[in-house]
Amino acid sequence: MTNLLSSSTAAIPTVRPSQTGPIGLLRRLRAHPGGDPAIAGLFGFLVSVAFSWVPSVWFDESATVVSATRSWKQLFAEVQNVDAVHATYYALMHGWFDLVGYTPFTLRLPSALAVGVAAGLLVVLARELTTRRTALVAGLLFVVLPRVTFMATEGRSYATATALVVALTLVFVHASKQTLKNPSRFVRWWLLYGVVALASGAVFLYTVLIVVAHGVTLALWSLRGRRARRAQAWRSPIGGWLVSSAIVGACLVPLALLSSSQSKQISWISKPDFSTLVSIFTWPWFMQNLPMAVFGWALVAVGIIAVVRRRSRYDAPNVVQIAVPWILVPVVGLIVASTVLSPLYSPRYVAFAAPAVALLMAAGLTSLKFRAVIGAGLIAVIALTAPSYVEQRQTEAKDSSSWSEVAALIAKERALEPSGATDAIIYGPIRRHPAASARNIAYSYPDAFEGMTDVTLKTPAAETGSLWETRYPLSETIDRVDGHRYVYLVTSNRQDLRPSVTSALKAEGYDVDQEWSLTWVNVVRYER
């Protein structure tokens, strides 16, 4: 009998290189129905979370910190007076901090997760509208857009709202298609649409504009079907959208009215002018990365042309019918409202249209057909967005904030002080935000300031029913420095309190020990 184990003629099993290693794993993953969304979602999370802890916390994020770390009762009292528009997001972050605790990393982690979720859902949505290849490319392009890589590292609601908007658009497409197929059984889909729309609007009120955009999409879709003389039951999907939208609008009216009464908190926004219109080309989704903006809009134009020229099915909206209203309605709506009523438009407020931009870019890129060209296009996008990504992961990337450096400096100096030394601190103004103080740095990096006596504190922020604490003039509380060996002053380099504080502390027997100047912040240590 032939020994097959020792025979030189025995067949030796071989493993194809393509089935092993990262490429093989990628192919096996793509073979699974949920593989492409998983790839885009994982890619989105990893790109987003990488180095997210490096940039210093800045003013807007400190509002999240000081709101979400107070008690539920205190948070409820706050949103009656200020930031009602962010109440739902603050509540979500409150629950998150209860679970994992606060650090700058945990502050931003939900946004990185939200970008991953949005990328995965965008792939699912795009597969309903176009090819599998275009869907995956759309998910990958979305992740690296400069606006997306920025909001992924920010402890604010923009990334979460974007994920909800993608989910809402996916439900909208399914609801419309299912209603056309069976007009008598559409209630559950439009009920789900209303629930997701309500959640989206509660997290970020301006996302209700995507509901309007869906109305435009439905009108374009139905008009196209009617012109083609297709016998479609358009009344049912339009009716479902109208009823759901009306209910959502009614539910959000109280939030809109309360937020409107607090509009002074966005008084920094100016009325749109010609420069605003020009900036739409580079700011909302490309964040002034001009080469990427030129390349991105070129792909968008190619994508629109390719979709319009292609004959598509009438039982589903095409990419242009979904994406163009998604982009235009929020931008035009906010600019018109800012012109007619009061200023409301800011480029960050339309961040939730980034998936639509990526969708059209992907349609343009994949219309070129050849894999090598598509691959080269993806590489070009990554190369063009890389400078923005690197810049966004620098320490002072967010509004030139140097707060982490200030906190590190104070922590280091306090660690070098003699054992048993006690510290007081005076928080001066913070640049460009007259209602707040440099105590925002301590809210954002509490460990560095633990145990220090805040000399001028009157009422802690959590007890004011507003965002920030109230403070006494230094002249009324200067005696609180008694018993402390060191006094620190942290103040803006513009509203600089160094001369007046130095004079007041001199009378108490304190002399300047050391001074430091950081970006927008001056720090002084006095010793007695």
Image (cartoon, grey):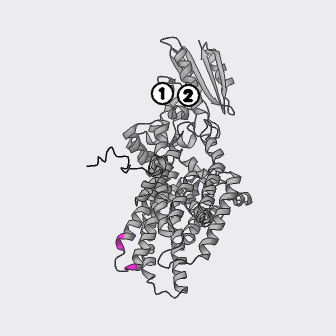
Q: Residue at x 52, y 52 (%)?
A: 158
Q: Main secondary structure of the magenta part?
A: loop
Above-or-below relation of 481 to 216: above
Residue 332 on image: x %, y %: 62, 65
The C terminus is located in which quarter?
top right
Can residue 265 be seen in the rendering of this structure? yes
Span colored in magenta: 181-188
In front of the other: 99 or 225 = 225
Left or right relative to 76: residue 229? right
Name the residue tied to disc 1: 447
Left or right relative to 251: residue 144? right
Name the residue tied to disc 2: 407
Instruction: Determine crowd level at label 1: few under 14, some 14-19, many 20+ residues with C-alpha closer than 10 A.
Output: few
> Which amino acid does the dot numbered 2 rest on?
Ala
Residue 205 on image: x %, y %: 50, 58
Residue 451 on image: x %, y %: 47, 22
